[in-house]
Image (cartoon, rainbow, N blue to C red):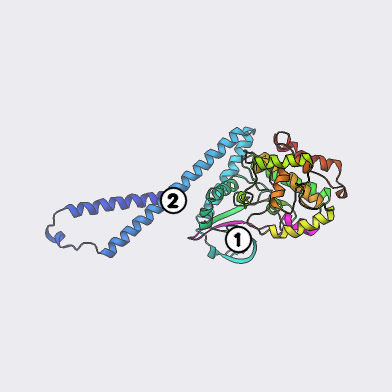
Amino acid sequence: MDSARSWFNKLQTREKSIGKKKDMPPSGKEGTDEAPSSATKQRVAAAKQYIEKHYKEQMKHLQDRKERRYSFERKLADANVSEEEQNNILKQFEKKETEYMRLQRHKMSAEDFDLLTVIGKGAFGEVRICREKTTGNVYAMKKLKKSEMLRRGQVEHVRAERNLLAEVDHHCIVKLYCSFQDNEFLYLIMEYLPGGDMMTLLMRKDTLTEDEARFYVGETVLAIEAIHRHNYIHRDIKPDNLLLDRYGHLRLSDFGLCKPLDYAAFPDLNEKDVTANRTSSAHGDGRQQTTPKRTQQEQLEHWQKNRRTLAYSTVGTPDYIAPEVLLKKGYGMECDWWSLGAIMYEMLVGYPPFYSDEPMTTCRKIVNWRTHLKFPEEARLTLDAKDLISRLLCSVDQRLGTKGAHLV
């Protein structure tokens, strides 16, 4: 940055001296000097533009880093953390920022990687395995189309993901190594997790034992706590975003870039609709139950068949969304704990607690959760499992995790 500033100052000095010479009357040989050619002027203008752009970008990076540091310090001050722990966290933050800036100076591009198998597709692009040519290290490359992000107004979500991954260094959070862009795409180089995701695991195993569910729920709690401590809300926790490493440990992924619920797909959901739905249910007219009653095995088979389709949908599924989010009345970090309860239910029963053939019906069931949260007898859940799920899938003021992850 100092070198850029010195170049800029020298260029300004040179321009001033050239300007003075132009103002001087010609005398002797000086009057016979030829004026700079148009090609020379173009090269000078291009050099000036390049240096000014480089200098402005460096100053912007410095300002962004200062703002991230200031914001992070404020969050730490508001958190219930000792001074010693604050210092340790700040050291880790600076170390990660320094490493990120070091990687940024490499001026990496897509040409530095061999592109391998595509492992996922989303609304903005794709995710594929890649291998760095110089080191041979394998990563997951998230390739996002910038024009599509601009069209959908998702630029701030991308920035939020980058800031969160720069701040949070946790073994249950997927790691971001570096990012770069070209004229058309933004690239995020993430750690590659070969274990797949929780959705695939549940498709393969149907249900998990309570010991297996306890393990994965415990690691998800640690991941949610890590982002909540930094005042972030994930808002889209679902089996697709719970990745597994080679040892079977869990990583939470997709911060800000995960596919948001397209509310336009459910235009009829509003308070009037919800109230009418609750009234009809209370009078027992039978209009709310639009699908035939199925056994647990039939429901499981139906869910798995449709889940494979929803996995590649641009709209996705509302099965894990908290009722306060659907009602659009404002929500906080509590919505992530609701999602955890829905995932735990699916782990043990085989399908989400409010699953229906139609997404709109699912939304209604979630909003009217008191009526529709039931545990099938065939699942044979223990009282402890039912109690934990019930204390996650409940009203906001009573939901576990609202006053801290240590209560979960």
**Amino acid type at image mark 1:** Glu
Q: Residues within 10 Å of mark 1 (few under 14, many from 20)?
A: some
> Which of 49/97 is in front?
49
**Amino acid type at image mark 2:** Glu
Q: Is residue 206 visible?
A: no
Q: Residue 132 location, x and y as percent?
A: 59, 63
Q: Residue 16 location, x and y as percent?
A: 25, 50
Find residue 57 and name its label. Answer: 2
Count of marks overlaid on the render:
2
Query: Is 265 located above or below residue 280 in the figure?
Result: below
Foreground mark, 1 or 2, reads 1
Q: Residue at x 24, y 62 (%)?
A: 36
Q: In this rendering, would 51 be left or right of 183?
A: left
Q: Is residue 129 visible?
A: yes
State the image quarter where residue 370 is shown.
Answer: top right
Whole-angstrom CA distance, mark 1 to mark 2, is 28 Å
> Which of 188/258 is in front?
258
> Which of 259/112 is in front?
259
Outermost residue, left side = 28
State the image quarter where residue 127 is shown.
Answer: bottom right
Magenta stretch: residue 189 in it?
A: yes
Quarter of the rendering occupied by the C terminus? top right
Question: Which residues make up the magenta segment?
Answer: 181-206
Q: Secondary structure at mark 2?
A: helix
Query: Is 260 located above or below residue 131 in the figure?
Result: above
Q: Residue 263 location, x and y as percent?
A: 62, 49
Q: Residues within 10 Å of mark 2 (few under 14, many from 20)?
A: few
Q: In this rendering, would 155 be left or right of 376?
A: left
Quickly name the residue at label 1.
Answer: 126
Magenta stretch: residue 228 in it?
A: no
Q: Residue 121 location, x and y as percent?
A: 63, 60
